[in-house]
């Protein structure tokens, strides 16, 4: 049986103050003290869940600071390598970064495209759409398919990427009405979702959630 834990990073500075994104590069936003505590709790939960099982192959992570910090905290419990991968990066919100999404899409230059394309295909100027995140997440799965055959693997990423990974692992179709807000509500900070498969072919089943107890 193979088990994959998909973890969203802990609370970040940007979760506390969204305006920070207009002053600091998205990839440099760090975990808050609470975020670090959340991940320490999740690490203990994963360790308990893995008792008697083989250590994870590696921790695959988004290269963004808040995710590498999350991965480093989790890795303390296993002594495994951390493997950053650009395909697991945060969705690129382009010029919407640092703005309220609802206000941004009402701008005359954006409203027509949002109304025409919908939340699934719409991408803010110089950004990317959820469907593009879905495509690159699938590319990660294809390029790193070997992790699906290892007994234990941990993947650390962001809400939108985690949701797309869920679709690929469970072999389910994305919902074209998905929004970034849905991804965030489905995958709160510091949440680890557990997926298991009895073997080949590798369609996984979501079998449980490991919550951060510090909220």
Image (cartoon, helix red, strand yellow):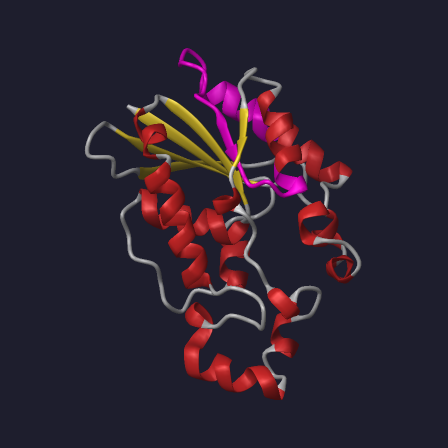
Give the farthest residue toward the right. 23
Residue 197 found in image quarter: top left
Residue 187 vs residue 64: left or right? Answer: left
The x and y percentages for residue 5 are 45, 33
Magenta segment: 41-67
Residue nearest the observer in this picture, 22 or 170? 22
Residue 104 vs residue 55: left or right? Answer: right
Residue pictured at 77% horizontal, 54% vertical: 24
Residue nearest the observer in this picture, 146 or 159? 146
Residue 213 visible at all: no
Residue pictured at 64% horizontal, 26% vertical: 73
Residue pictured at 53% horizontal, 36% vertical: 61
The x and y percentages for residue 46 are 51, 25
Residue 76 visible at all: yes
Residue 152 vs residue 11: left or right? Answer: left
Residue 195 colored in magenta in the image: no
**Where is the N terminus found, in terms of image quarters?**
top left
The x and y percentages for residue 183 are 50, 56
The x and y percentages for residue 85 are 51, 39
Residue pictured at 45% horizontal, 56% vertical: 133
Relative vertical location of residue 2 with respect to residue 140 in this rendering, above or below: above
Residue 63 colored in magenta in the image: yes
Give the farthest residue toward the top. 52
Relative vertical location of residue 214 with respect to residue 78 in this rendering, above or below: below
Give the farthest residue toward the left. 201
**Where is the C terminus found, in terms of image quarters?**
top right
Total labels: the figure holds 0
């Amino acid at each position: 049986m193979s088990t994959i834990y998909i973890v969203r990073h802990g609370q970040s500075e940007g979760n506390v103050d969204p305006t920070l994104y207009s002053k600091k590069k998205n990839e440099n936003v760090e975990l808050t003290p609470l975020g670090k505590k959340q991940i320490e709790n999740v690490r203990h939960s994963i360790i308990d869940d893995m008792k008697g099982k083989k250590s994870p192959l590696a921790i695959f992570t988004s290269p963004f600071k808040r995710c590498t910090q999350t991965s480093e905290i989790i890795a303390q419990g296993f002594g495994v390598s951390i493997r950053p991968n650009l395909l697991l990066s945060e969705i690129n919100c382009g010029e919407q970064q640092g703005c309220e999404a609802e206000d941004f899409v009402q701008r005359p230059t954006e409203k027509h495209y949002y109304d025409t394309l919908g939340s699934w295909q719409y991408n803010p100027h110089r950004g990317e759409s959820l469907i593009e995140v879905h495509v690159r997440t699938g590319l990660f799965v294809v390029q790193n398919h070997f992790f699906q055959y290892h007994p234990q693997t941990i993947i650390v990423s962001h809400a939108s990427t985690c949701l797309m990974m869920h679709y690929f692992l469970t072999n389910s179709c994305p919902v074209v009405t998905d929004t970034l807000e849905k991804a965030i509500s489905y995958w709160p900070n510091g949440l680890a979702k557990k997926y298991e498969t009895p073997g080949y072919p590798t369609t996984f089943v979501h079998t449980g959630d490991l919550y951060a107890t510090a909220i």
